[in-house]
Image (cartoon, grey):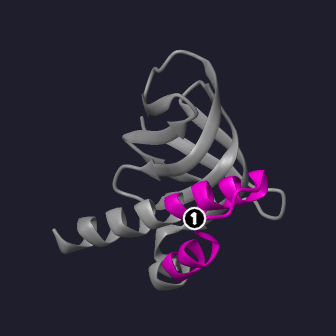
Amino acid sequence: MPVTLKLVTPVKVLPPEQGVQVTVTASDGEIGIRQGHAPLVALVGHGRVSVSGGKTFAVRGGVAQVLKDEVNVLVIEALEASAIDAVKVQARLEAIAGGTAASAEDEVAWLKAQLAVAHRGKAAAAH
């Protein structure tokens, strides 16, 4: 029996994805969730959520809940890897380089997470 990912943002609920493993970037490291995983609640950092053999998303902070082979992830924002324009993201990072405002730090972390997911997606597609 596969694990089901349900990814929710304030503006949309993405269609459920199923796979052998769901990987979530928690605030304190990556978590791999497979069938039979113990119940869990974790803070989600800026990073990625992916389903083995399925889609990968860049996510911007939230919370993840694991219960009965279902992973519910509620985040501020989620972008599918294929929708990330790495050139635009890199340009935005360069435009705000050197900013000291707290909001700039959050945006930089979000942009870096998008780049990491975009680059990881291209590397996986090459294999």
Q: Relative to 42, say whether 12 is above or below.
A: below
Q: In this image, 54 relative to 47: left or right? A: left
**Kind of residue sitting beneath label 1:** Leu
Label 1: state its secondary structure. Answer: helix
**Residue 124 placed where, x, y %?**
26, 65
Choose between 122 and 95: the one closer to the eye: 95
Choose between 12 and 123: the one closer to the eye: 123
Most extreme residue toward the right is 10
Q: Residue at x 78, y 63 (%)?
A: 12
Classify the position of the N terminus by image quarter. Answer: top left
Magenta part mainly helix, strand or loop? Answer: helix
Q: In this image, 3 relative to 125: left or right? A: right
Q: Relative to 61, say whether 37 is above or below.
A: above
Q: Residue at x 53, y 82 (%)?
A: 91
Q: In this image, 68 relative to 74: left or right? A: left
- Using the rendered view, name the quadrant where residue 120 is placed: bottom left
**Residue 13 placed where, x, y %?**
74, 59
- Using the rendered view, name the quadrant where residue 15 is placed: bottom right
Q: Is residue 94 magenta?
A: yes
Q: Residue at x 34, y 56 (%)?
A: 53
| Magenta stretch bounds | 90-112
- Mark 1 packing: few (<14 Cα in 10 Å), some, or many (20+)? many
